[in-house]
Image: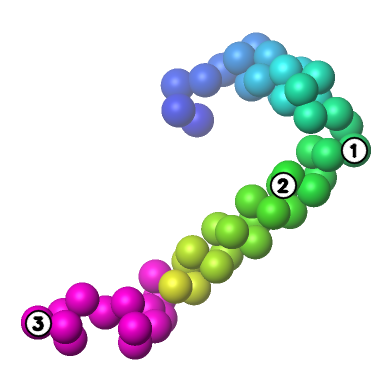
Amino acid sequence: MFGLGWPEIAIIVVVAVVIFGPKKIPELGSALGKTLRGFKEELKTPSEDTNPEEEK
């Protein structure tokens, strides 16, 4: 996973918990999941107003 081993991942998790706190981590994960889901949906079905080929 991006050239990271388990010790590096553990350090990143510990730093994230220290910075954001244990209560905020699930909220951040949920927001990230919703953002990625919306991004994937937009890639599959782009809206009509964002299609640059029709403007030419």
In the displayed structure image, the side of residue 47 where residue 8 appears, left or right? right
Q: Which quarter of the rendering shows the C terminus?
A: bottom left
Above or below for 31 versus 44:
above
**Would you say residue 6 is visible in this rendering?**
no
Predominant SS of the magenta segment: helix
Task: Please provide the residue range marked out in magenta.
Answer: 43-56
Pointer 2 residue: 29
Foreground mark, 3 or 2, reads: 3
Residue 23's disc number: 1
Q: Specify which label sits upstream in the sequence, 3 or 1.
A: 1
Above or below for 34 versus 49:
above
In the displayed structure image, the side of residue 16 where residue 22 appears, left or right? right
Q: Distance between the residues labelled 1 and 2?
A: 11 Å
Residue 56's disc number: 3
Q: Specify which label sits upstream in the sequence, 3 or 2.
A: 2
In-front residue for pair 6/21? 21
Q: What element carries label 1?
A: loop
In the displayed structure image, the side of residue 31 where residue 55 appears, left or right? left
Q: Identify which amino acid the numbered label 3 is placed on.
A: Lys
Q: Which residue is drawn at 73% across and 45% down?
A: 28
Q: Which residue is drawn at 81% across and 19% down?
A: 18
Q: Identify which amino acid the numbered label 2 is placed on.
A: Gly
Q: How far apart are marks 3 and 2 (CA)?
A: 39 Å
Q: Which residue is drawn at 45% across and 28% down?
A: 2
